[in-house]
Image: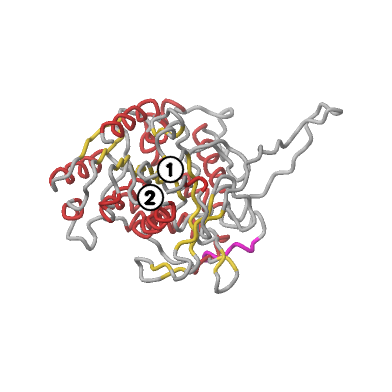
Amino acid sequence: MSNATTRSSSSVRPRSPVHSAPISNRVSAVNSQPQAVEPQLPPVTGALMPGDPLGDRRLCQVHPDRRFALESGGSLEHVEIAYETWGELNSDGTNGVLVCHALTGDSHAAGRAGVGHPGPGWWESLIGPGKPIDTNENFVVCSNVLGGCQGSTGPASTNPATATPYGSDFPLVSIRDMVRAQAFLSDELGITSWRSVIGGSMGGMQVIEWAVMFPDRVRTAIVASSTVAASAQQIAWSHIGRNVIESDPGFNGGDYYDAEPGQGPHRGLELARQIAQVTYRSDEVFTERFGRNLVRQLDFGAARLFDVEGYLEYHGRKLVNRFDANSYLRLNRAMDFHDIGRGRGGTVEALSRVKAPVLTVSVRSDSLYPPTQQIEMHEGLLESGGDSTFFALDSPHGHDGFLIEFPKLGPVIRKFLQENQ
C-alpha cells in the first residue's frame, strides 16, 4: 500500500495549496488615521460554496456509480466527503486514527488558519508531531460529516436534479449515515481498520456507532462527553434552538441561498448559538469570568449592559460567518435520533458488539452531557463483556471541557493509545 498522502485516485481531488491569510483594515502610511470601514452584512450562509478555496481539504466521492442510501429511507446522488490528513499511512495501512468532530466542527482538526480555514484546528493542541495523537506515528484523518457545510455534501451543496442548492430538499441524516460515509472514505484511503476512532459530543456519537457498526475495523475507541442515546433534556434544548432558526423570516422554509447578504437567517442562527453556548459552559465559569460585570454605566434602558451578553453575541456572530443554518438543523436533529440500541435489541445488546477497548471520558461540570451518561456507557460496556476505562476530567468548563482542557486530556489519550498498541 502506498503512502496515502500521495495516493492517486479518480475519486480523490488533490488538496489546494495553503496561502497566507490576507491582511485587511491596514492603516495608510500617508494618513496615520485608520480608514473608515463600512459594517459588513452577515452572510446568507457561512458554508463552503462551489468555487471557494478548499484549503487543506481533499474531496472523496462516495459511491460515484450509485446513490447513497440513508437510514431515513431517502438517498443522495453524487455524495462528496471533505477530509484532511496529517502524518503518513504505513505500508500495511494499520496506523490510521479517525478523529470525529462535534456539531459545528469540521475537518480542520489541526493546522493553522489560512485561506479556506478561518481559524486554527479545533484540536490543534492534541494532534501533531510529538503530541498526544502523534502524527510521527499515526496517519490522522478528520472528515466533515455528511450533512455538514464545510465541503461535504449538505443542504448548501448543489442538487444535481436542479443545479441549485438543496435547501429544504436536503433529507434528514443520522449518525449512522455519517459513519457509513466515513467507512467508504476509509476504504478509499486503504485503511481496513483504525488504530483508534476518537471524538467528543456528536463526535463521540460517531465513535460509539463506529465500534458497534464495524467492530472489526476499530481497534480502540475514545469517547468524550457523549452518550449512548440522546436524553429528553438534550432533545429539548435542540428543539428550542431549531425553532429559533426556523422562526427567522430570513429562513424562508430553508430556501434562502439566493438572498442578499443580511437577508438570510443569520439572526436565528445567532440566537440558536447563544442558547447552545449557555449549555456548553458551566455556571461557575460564567460567574468567575463575567459575574455581574457591566460594559457601561448602569442604564436601565440599555439593550446590552452586562459583559456576558456581549460574549454570547460574539459567539453567535462568529458562527454565522462559518456555518449554515440548514446544516445546523440537520446535524442537530441527527443528534436527537442517536440511540445505539435502536433496532438492535437495546443498549446492552448493541454494546455487546464492541470488540475494541474503549476510553470513556466525562467532564465533572458538564450539565448538557452529564457524567452519569458516560458512566452508563462505561458500565454498559463492562456488563456486555467489553473493555472500558473511565476517566473523570476535573474541569469547571462544562461540556466544552473536552475542547479546552488539553493539558489534562492529552496525557490520558496518549497513555491509552500507548497501552493499547
Give residue 390's position: percent from left, percent from top.
23, 35
Q: Earlier in the sequence, mark 2 or mark 1?
A: 1
Give residue 217's position: percent from left, percent from top.
30, 51
> Disc 2, disc 1: CB below 8 Å?
yes
Q: CA distance from mark 2 to mark 1?
A: 9 Å
**Vertical arrangement, residue 244 with respect to residue 303, above or below:** below
Give residue 176's position: percent from left, percent from top.
34, 58
Which residue is at a point 68% across and 46% down the rendered structure image? 40
- Farthest bottom residue? 161
Assign the magenta stretch its main secondary structure. Answer: loop
Q: Look at the image and give the residue range highlighted in magenta.
A: 253-259
- Asked whether, in this view, residue 381 is left or right of residue 129, the answer is left
Name which residue type carries label 1.
Answer: Leu
Q: Secondary structure at mark 2?
A: loop
Give residue 219's position: percent from left, percent from top.
28, 44
Q: Residues within 10 Å of mark 1 (few under 14, many from 20)?
A: many
Q: Coloured how?
A: secondary structure
Residue placed under numbered mark 1 in the picture: 89
Q: Residues within 10 Å of mark 2 (few under 14, many from 20)?
A: many
Q: Between residue 83 and residue 328, name the one nearer to us.
A: 83
Name which residue type carries label 2.
Answer: Ile
Which residue is at a point 57% across and 40% down the rendered structure image? 303
Mark drawn on residue 119: none
In reply to whether residue 141 is colored magenta, the answer given is no
Mark drawn on residue 191: 2
- Asked whether, in this view, residue 47 is left or right of residue 72, the answer is right
- Farthest right residue? 30
- Asked whether, in this view, residue 57 is left or right of residue 349, the answer is right
User: Where, quadrant-wise, is the C terminus in this rendering?
Assistant: top left
